[in-house]
């Protein structure tokens, strides 16, 4: 936060041009069935809004107004309520984002253990500021609040999906290269220290990627 | 101010309330390969507690009484007696009743539920099912924060298996007890960890906390009786049933007994999630369990249970254990047992600035003191951090905390105010060092 | 009966009450913003905090614990409570800001917080002068602010729809507007967007806030965040008089305030009446206020040499009297008006009876399908039910035409309507007859056929009684002055702050925009006197007393009984 700059609440475009091709703005029969399935889990249709928005975001990549309206109509709930919900939660992308969204935790433990350094490294490497998307549409980078992996600081999440633990600048460089080549990181399991002592490490035999809790780096910057 | 750190080893004079913790055998996350798989879980006696309760024809009230007798207190931060909470549910009527299992885990410094769900999902399900039985509930919503997408997938996969094997769903173990578990995916909002806000989120609304009373047990999800318990709390329930309330009550600290997952992060050599009884000495956790401070630096501060709990100065942790009484005596709280350890090089002003930013960012904006106050707190701390503050601002910070505490719909404002109040109180010299001398008389106010 | 102690005063209460509402009902002010009696209680503004306690009860004996003086020991809640959400219970002890320093401190703190991101642009804000935030900040707020940072920037001057403008920065997030569209109008067009201090109400993209009741959110907005696109910047609150009356747009007779500046109606807002409109007004009741101001005739006219020329009121009355003198029975046709009051229509029936003419008829103004089962009706007149109760029924155009075609009719007397414009008569139907017309607009199409044209006072300029579609009889009061004001009108006029607080030496009263017109209850007796009928009453109040005494269909509908909220008449299809 810049001390001398006001905080700004932007006005979303009132009558925006649709960003999704009208012909593509439909749910398939299978998607409709899934949404109906979500609906059955709750006593009211509203209960399924969040899951249906997730489904829509996975399908369309983000949630422009016409997609939120599509979800609202599919569930038979007021469009305004669905829009209010979509703007409340940070993981719903109201605007178009890069192919990979790199959410670097800079909060609390990660702040003190190099999270800010990792974000700055990404900023200089990709030539964009936090909150921005690279010109080629590949990467959006953001500093985010605690992602609940504090013991593995610094860490980040990629596009609301996999967690990447114990970040270093080298690790980030490798990841970026891999992502440029189109590869989305997979799931990594974090081994418990007590498991390492008692069971020789990874307790899951169905997981290849494993991270261990390790001594966090010394942060150069924390703001 | 010279911050005196404890000796750098476990404090000799103090005694741990965790008993012989070095011999402790884990129960929430026992050392079993692939325990997350249903077959393995069953082999290791999984779902036996549920079977015992259902086929042994326990009265629901007996289950609740057993949990009450165990002394189990919530692991989500408030440390409220779980069995007692269950008894708040009104008598059964024709309408639905709900259990919400709170896996929102968004309190900075807290990362234990994620590991528990990954490594022992069926223990969570079993706890949910027993709790449902105890309160005659037929639907449980397991609310997991949206960021935990991979663990949601994991839990859904395991839940499907539990359904397939008849542990969840209709007529469990051939009895007339039926319960559904629904996994609800959040989408990024700290406030959803607050129980009433979680219910609003489940109902598909903007997650604004509700005023209490009415309490969830009277007017919860969709206006029906509802109980909300944390993931780890419910995971303790099958253990209490199978091993007995006395076993549980005798483990760890007397007033907050049982096993607990300590999530330790920050400037220690080996951070991580550790399972031990409650009542561990903070110094044992840092210097023994976590193998000491990184680079042998001196300890400066410890936040014992998530960002909302007041930080303790190094000289305040001597003999202090991770339990309700000991931490209250020290001037903090157990919270989620998500502990942040900070070394002597930590800039507490910058740290508080970031913490305040968090609460500002996560305030839902529903009610005045929090919506307005969290931003003001952040700006004031930022102003001090940037060397533009003066001593008057420190008083204003404290005043502002008083304006927020206890006056809002939920406890987020308190959670935002406490770190400010106590960091300022306990590290005041660092704040004063960044302040410039006040040139403005205290009485001169900026006109509204 | 259960008792509650509020500020050391014990009072008995009955039934379920929220503490705030109980205090408000007793005339005891507690500052608040988000609470609205018609909507759910979110307790989000946190302004109405009070200290609340209950007598301490000994757990063993279940007896109240007493102190040394024998008074019950009160155990206070550890936190202050929002009075809006608190159910009053027996034995409760409450301290408001009047008796507790902590409460007044909390209220002051809360206002300081509410104002830190509020623009404090009262000098250019329409709400200033009648703004709950402004008023309560003055009464309960701090003298200054300690906030010295840049305020949050939010969208300003955003038209949410055709009628409502948003200033996001002024919003205090009380959510009244959102709750109105969710719970009351059920249009679900508004939501709060964003989170935290960036929150503000908005429609989702691509949606207009065109709810036919949208403007109610302007009334209930406790700050200047939502203003009327029609009214904004037209007048300051202290420049206008606000007269309690009813709307004339349809047959619901919703209660309203007419806002008048310089003798022009500039705004219409809702006035609470649980029996009629609750707290609400449809947008159609609020718009087109210029119909009261523009195209108004200025003084009577009489046809001379084929032209309507200006006349004095006496000349005009003489001319009308001359036309009526000697006509009787089938020679004269009376058309009353569902736009006019019961009093005026009653006087007209008396005049018709005096001349042995048929009872008057009225011109119906019905828009089929407009009815929304709430505050909008098909009938676009305010007093058709009053006419019916007087025995005045809708005109049958075929009957009228055949009467006129028969050649018997020599005079048509039209009160406050435009039968030609309404299509009940054609202009050429009136070619061979004399027409006496009470009219309120120069655009009245029947005016071209009139021989005597008498400008009449509109509903906002007169005193009278109107009966709504549910049989609720209500009074209207003069909101704007007319030329040559009658004493009764003067006494009933709505007052502005200047009227009330300025000295006689302040030259604030304006003569502009006063219309030279007369209410029916002045004009009709004047004309009746010229055909030997004494219709003189002291004023409309006495006319109505006569109607209520004579006709069972109006039983009880005296001015005293009707007061500000009207009386429900007995169900009646009764013909007087």
Image (cartoon, coloured by chain):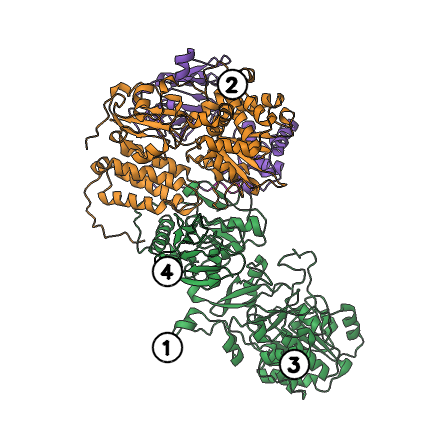
Chain colours: A purple, B orange, C green
* Circle 3: element type: loop
Residue mark closest to the camera, 1 vs 2: 2
- Residue range in magenta is A11-16
Residue A2 shows in this picture: no
Disc 2 crowd rating (10 Å Cα; few below 14, some 14-19, many 20+) is many
Residue at image mark 1: C505
| Distance Cα–Cα, label 4 vs label 1 | 39 Å
| Distance Cα–Cα, label 1 vs label 2 | 90 Å
As drawn, is C474 to the left or to the right of B206? Answer: right
* Chain assignment, label 2: B
Residue mark closest to the camera, 1 vs 3: 1
Which of these two is toward me, C18 or C188?
C18
Is residue A13 part of the magenta span, yes or no? yes
Look at the picture and state if C383 lies above or below B17.
Answer: below
Magenta stretch secondary structure, dominant: loop
Residue at image mark 2: B36
């Amino acid at each position: 936060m810049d001390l001398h700059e006001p905080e700004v609440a932007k006005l979303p475009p009132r009558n925006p041009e649709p960003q999704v091709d009208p012909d593509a703005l439909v749910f398939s029969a299978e998607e409709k069935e899934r949404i109906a399935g979500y609906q059955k889990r709750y006593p009211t249709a509203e209960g399924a809004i969040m899951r249906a928005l997730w489904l829509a975001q996975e399908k369309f990549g983000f949630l422009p107004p016409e997609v939120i309206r599509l979800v609202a109509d599919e569930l038979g709930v007021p469009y305004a309520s669905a829009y209010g919900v979509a703007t409340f939660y940070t993981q719903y992308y109201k605007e178009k984002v890069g192919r990979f969204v790199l959410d670097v935790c800079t909060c609390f433990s990660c702040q003190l253990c190099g999270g800010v350094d990792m974000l700055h490294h990404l900023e200089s490497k990709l030539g964009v500021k936090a909150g921005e998307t690279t010109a080629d549409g590949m990467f959006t980078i953001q500093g985010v609040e605690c992602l609940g992996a504090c013991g593995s600081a610094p860490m980040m999440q990629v596009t609301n999906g996999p967690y990447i633990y114990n970040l270093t600048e080298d690790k980030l460089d490798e990841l970026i290269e891999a992502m440029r080549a189109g590869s989305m990181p997979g799931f990594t399991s974090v081994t418990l220290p007590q498991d390492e002592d008692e069971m020789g490490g990874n307790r899951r035999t169905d997981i290849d990627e494993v991270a261990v809790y390790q001594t966090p780096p010394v942060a150069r910057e924390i703001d | 101010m010279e911050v005196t750190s404890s000796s750098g080893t476990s404090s000799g004079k103090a005694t741990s309330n965790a008993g012989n913790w070095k011999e402790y055998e884990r129960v929430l996350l026992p050392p079993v390969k692939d325990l997350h798989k249903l077959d393995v879980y069953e082999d290791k006696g999984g779902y036996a507690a549920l079977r015992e309760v259902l086929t042994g024809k326990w009265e629901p009230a007996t289950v609740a009484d057993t949990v009450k007798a165990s002394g189990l207190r919530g692991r989500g931060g408030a440390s409220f007696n779980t069995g007692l909470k269950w008894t708040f549910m009104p008598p059964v009527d024709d309408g639905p009743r709900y259990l919400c299992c709170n896996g929102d885990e968004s309190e900075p410094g807290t990362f234990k539920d994620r590991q528990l769900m990954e490594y022992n999902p069926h223990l969570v399900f079993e706890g949910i099912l027993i709790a449902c039985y105890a309160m005659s509930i037929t639907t449980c919503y397991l609310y997991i924060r949206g960021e935990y997408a991979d663990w949601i997938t994991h839990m859904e996969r395991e839940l499907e298996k539990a359904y397939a094997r008849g542990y969840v769903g209709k007529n469990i173990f051939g009895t007339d007890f039926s319960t559904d578990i629904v996994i609800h995916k959040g989408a990024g909002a700290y406030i959803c960890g607050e129980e009433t806000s979680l219910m609003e989120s489940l109902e598909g609304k903007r997650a604004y906390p509700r005023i209490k009373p009415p309490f969830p047990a009277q007017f919860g999800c969709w206006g029906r009786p509802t109980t909300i318990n944390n993931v780890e709390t419910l995971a303790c329930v099958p253990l209490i049933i199978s091993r007995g309330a006395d076993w549980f009550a005798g483990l760890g600290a007397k007033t907050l007994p049982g096993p607990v997952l300590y999530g330790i992060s920050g400037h220690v050599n080996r951070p991580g999630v550790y399972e031990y009884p409650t009542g561990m000495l903070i110094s044992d956790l840092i210097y023994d369990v976590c193998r000491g401070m990184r680079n042998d630096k001196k300890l400066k501060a410890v936040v014992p249970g998530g960002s909302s709990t007041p930080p303790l100065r190094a000289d305040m942790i001597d003999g202090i254990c991770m339990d309700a009484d000991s931490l209250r005596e020290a001037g903090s709280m157990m919270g989620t047992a998500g502990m942040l350890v900070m070394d002597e090089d930590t800039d507490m002003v910058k740290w508080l600035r970031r913490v305040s930013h968090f609460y500002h960012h996560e305030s839902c904006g529903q009610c005045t003191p929090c919506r307005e106050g969290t931003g003001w707190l952040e700006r004031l701390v930022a102003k001090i951090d940037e060397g533009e503050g003066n001593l008057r601002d420190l008083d204003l910070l404290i005043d502002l905390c008083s304006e927020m505490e206890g006056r809002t719909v939920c406890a987020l404002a308190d959670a935002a105010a406490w770190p400010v109040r106590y960091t300022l109180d306990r590290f005041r010299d660092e704040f004063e060092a960044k302040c410039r001398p006040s040139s403005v008389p205290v009485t001169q106010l900026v006109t509204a | 009966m259960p008792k509650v102690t509020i500020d050391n005063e014990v009072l008995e209460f009955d039934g379920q009450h929220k503490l705030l509402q109980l205090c408000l009902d007793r005339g005891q002010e507690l500052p608040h913003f988000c609470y609205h009696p018609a909507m759910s209680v979110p307790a989000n503004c946190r302004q109405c905090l009070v200290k609340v306690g209950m007598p301490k009860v000994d757990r063993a004996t279940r007896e109240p614990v007493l102190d040394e003086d024998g008074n019950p020991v009160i155990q206070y809640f550890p936190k202050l409570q929002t009075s809006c959400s608190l159910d009053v219970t027996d034995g409760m002890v409450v301290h408001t800001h009047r008796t507790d320093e902590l409460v007044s401190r909390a209220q002051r703190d809360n206002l300081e917080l509410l104002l830190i991101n509020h623009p404090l642009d009262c000098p250019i804000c329409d709400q200033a002068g009648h703004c709950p935030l402004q008023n309560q900040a003055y009464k309960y707020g701090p003298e200054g602010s300690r906030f010295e940072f840049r305020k949050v920037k939010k969208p300003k001057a955003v038209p949410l729809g055709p009628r409502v403008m948003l200033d996001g920065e002024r919003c205090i997030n009380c959510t009244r507007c959102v709750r109105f569209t969710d719970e009351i109008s059920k249009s679900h067009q508004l939501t709060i967007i964003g989170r935290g201090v960036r929150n503000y109400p908005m429609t989702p993209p691509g949606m207009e806030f065109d709810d036919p009741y949208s403007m109610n959110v302007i009334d209930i907005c406790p700050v200047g965040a939502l203003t009327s696109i029609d009214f904004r910047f037209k007048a300051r609150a202290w420049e206008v008089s606000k007269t309690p009356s009813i709307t004339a747009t349809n047959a619901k007779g919703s209660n309203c305030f007419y806002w008048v500046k310089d003798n022009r109606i500039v705004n219409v807002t809702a006035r609470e009446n649980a029996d009629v409109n609750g707290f609400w007004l449809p947008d159609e009741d609020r718009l087109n206020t210029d119909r009261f101001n523009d195209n108004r005739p200025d003084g009577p006219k009489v046809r001379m040499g084929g032209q309507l020329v200006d006349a004095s009121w006496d000349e005009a009355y003489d001319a009308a009297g001359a036309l009526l003198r000697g006509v009787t029975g089938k020679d004269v046709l009376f058309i009353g008006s569902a736009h006019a009051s019961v009093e005026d229509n009653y006087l007209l029936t008396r005049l018709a009876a005096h001349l042995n003419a048929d009872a008057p008829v009225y011109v119906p103004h019905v828009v089929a399908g407009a009815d929304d089962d709430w505050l909008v009706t098909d009938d676009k007149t305010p007093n058709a039910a009053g006419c019916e109760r007087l025995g005045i029924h809708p005109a049958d155009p075929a009957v009228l035409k055949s009467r006129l075609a028969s050649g018997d009719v020599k005079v048509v007397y039209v009160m406050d309507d435009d039968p030609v414009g309404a299509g009940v008569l054609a202009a050429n139907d009136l070619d061979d007859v004399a027409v006496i017309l009470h009219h309120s607009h120069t655009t009245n199409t029947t005016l071209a056929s009139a021989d005597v044209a008498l400008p009449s006072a509109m509903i906002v300029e007169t005193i009278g009684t109107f009966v709504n579609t549910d049989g609720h009889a209500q009074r209207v009061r003069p909101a704007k002055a007319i030329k040559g004001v009658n004493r009764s009108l003067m006494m009933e006029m709505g007052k502005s702050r200047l009227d009330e607080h300025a000295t006689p030496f302040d030259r604030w009263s304006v003569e502009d925009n006063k219309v030279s017109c007369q209410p029916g209850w002045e004009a009709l007796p004047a004309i009746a006197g010229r055909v030997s009928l004494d219709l003189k009453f002291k004023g409309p109040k006495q006319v109505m007393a006569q109607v209520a005494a004579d006709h069972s269909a109006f039983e009880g509908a005296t001015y005293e009984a009707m007061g500000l909220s009207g009386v429900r008449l007995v169900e009646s299809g009764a013909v007087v």
